[in-house]
Image (cartoon, helix red, strand yellow):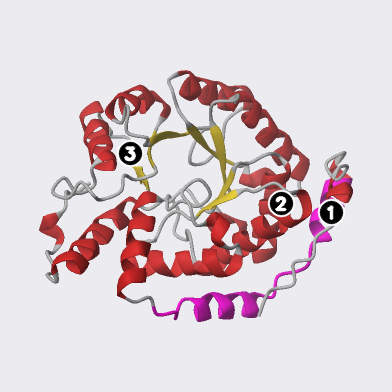
């Protein structure tokens, strides 16, 4: 069963951002989301059983996809250095454990994080654009981005102006993403956060996905992790359908990052099944799929050790973030 997501051809996409009216017409012309069907498919895929060898592979893959994150007012250089050390060696007793994909910090901590993961291949991501609310003037948001990139950020996680989006000012949202992408230069990839819990409807999530992709997002991301409703199997499935369809129409691949609320190995494996069954194997790589879920890493490490030793070590086995 697949959801109806027929989209215009690449040629037809070339002028949809010419004006507010053309972009609005395009977005509201996208097929409506069958909420019951979407949730039923997400639930069905979540029942897939993953056994020993495949589970070991899935756990290592999930570890390699984690963006290990600290975004608190009380963040210190010491905390960020400790986070970086954990990203590089998630299990210090087992050096076969994969590194995580990235550490994600505020812009003022980018230089500290960069030093902590130097030479490891772990990326440094930074939230920007007045995260998490996004309530700032555009020049302030762009300065935020440029500061993070200048400090060495490999990736920028921006938040869209949800107020503008919900007011139907889609071109304003599009133009802001374009400007942020330009501020990233050629050295930083851009993740665009929708805060799906505030967009209210699946139709809005689909529209936001297309706005982000049309504007040049390298990733589309569900949430900041700072609101009540974050990543769910259904909203992530919807975004995976969007990136699949976008590549079919344009040839451009865009990544997906569910964030917030994914805490267990069982949860992570369900999301990996969603990726494989919806977008396909091309997205089963941390260049194209990430988990924004720091607490998830500890459970992945505990389950990994259980598979290797037959014993469950419990939470004391791993460091507490």
Q: Quadrant of the N terminus?
A: bottom right
Frontmost of labels 1 and 3 is 1
Vertical comparison of 47 with 252: above or below: below
Tag 3: Cα neighbours inside 10 Å, few (<14), some, or many (≥20)? few
Earlier along the polypeptide chain: callout 1 or callout 3? 1
Q: Which residue is mark 1?
A: 26
Per the image, is 37 magenta? yes
**Residues in magenta?**
22-49
Residue 5 position by quadrant: bottom right
Find the distance from the CA under tag 1 to the CA under tag 3: 38 Å
The residue positioned 70% from the left and 63% from the top of the image is: 203
Q: Earlier in the sequence, mark 1 or mark 2?
A: 1
Instruction: Give the structural element (helix, strand or loop) at label 1.
Output: helix
Could you say whether the residue bearing mark 2 is in a helix, strand or loop?
helix
Residue position marked by numbered label 3 in the rendering: 72
**Residue mark closest to the camera, 3 vs 2:** 2
Q: Position of residue 65 (x, y in %)?
A: 41, 51
Any magenta on residue 248?
Answer: no
Q: Is residue 264 left or right of residue 202?
A: left
Q: Residue at x 27, y 28 (%)?
A: 116
Q: Categorize mark 1 by other alpha carbons within 10 Å: few (<14), some (14-19), many (20+).
A: some
Q: Which residue is mark 2?
A: 210
Is residue 264 visible to us here? no
Nearest the eye: 237 or 228: 237
Tag 1 near tag 3, CB within 8 Å: no
Real-space CA distance between mark 3 and mark 2, rounded to the nearest whole angstrom: 30 Å
What secondary structure is the stretch in magenta mostly built from? helix
Q: What residue sits 53% from the left and 54% below the top?
A: 222
Residue 90, image x and y in percent?
A: 24, 47
Label 1–label 2 contact, CB within 8 A: yes
């Amino acid at each position: 069963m697949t959801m109806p997501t027929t989209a215009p051809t690449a040629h037809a996409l070339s002028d949809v951002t010419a004006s507010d009216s053309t972009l609005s017409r395009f977005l509201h012309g996208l097929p409506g989301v069958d909420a019951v069907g979407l949730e039923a498919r997400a639930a069905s895929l979540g029942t897939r059983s993953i056994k020993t060898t495949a589970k070991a592979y899935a756990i290592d893959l999930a570890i390699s996809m984690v963006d290990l994150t600290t975004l608190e007012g009380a963040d210190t250089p010491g905390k960020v250095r400790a986070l970086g050390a954990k990203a590089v060696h998630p299990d210090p007793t087992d050096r076969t454990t994969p590194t995580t994909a990235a550490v994600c910090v505020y812009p003022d901590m980018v230089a500290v994080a960069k030093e902590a993961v130097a030479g490891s291949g772990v990326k440094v991501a930074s939230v920007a654009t007045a995260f998490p609310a996004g309530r700032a003037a555009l020049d302030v948001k762009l300065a935020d981005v440029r500061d993070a990139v200048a400090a060495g950020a490999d990736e920028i996680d921006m938040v869209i102006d949800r107020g503008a989006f919900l007011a139907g000012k889609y071109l304003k949202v599009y133009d802001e993403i374009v400007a942020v992408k330009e501020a990233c230069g050629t050295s930083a990839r851009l993740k665009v956060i929708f805060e799906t819990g505030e967009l209210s409807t699946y139709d809005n999530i689909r529209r936001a996905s297309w706005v982000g992709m049309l504007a040049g997002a390298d990733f589309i991301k569900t949430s900041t992790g700072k609101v009540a409703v974050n990543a769910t199997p259904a909203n992530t499935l919807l975004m995976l359908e969007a990136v699949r369809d976008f590549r079919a129409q344009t040839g451009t691949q865009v990544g997906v990052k569910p964030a917030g609320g994914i805490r267990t190995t069982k949860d992570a494996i369900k999301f990996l099944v969603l990726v494989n069954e919806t977008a396909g194997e091309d997205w089963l790589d941390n260049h194209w799929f990430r988990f924004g879920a720091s607490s998830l890493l500890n459970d992945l490490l505990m389950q990994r050790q259980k598979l290797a030793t037959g014993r469950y070590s419990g939470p004391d086995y791993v460091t507490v973030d």
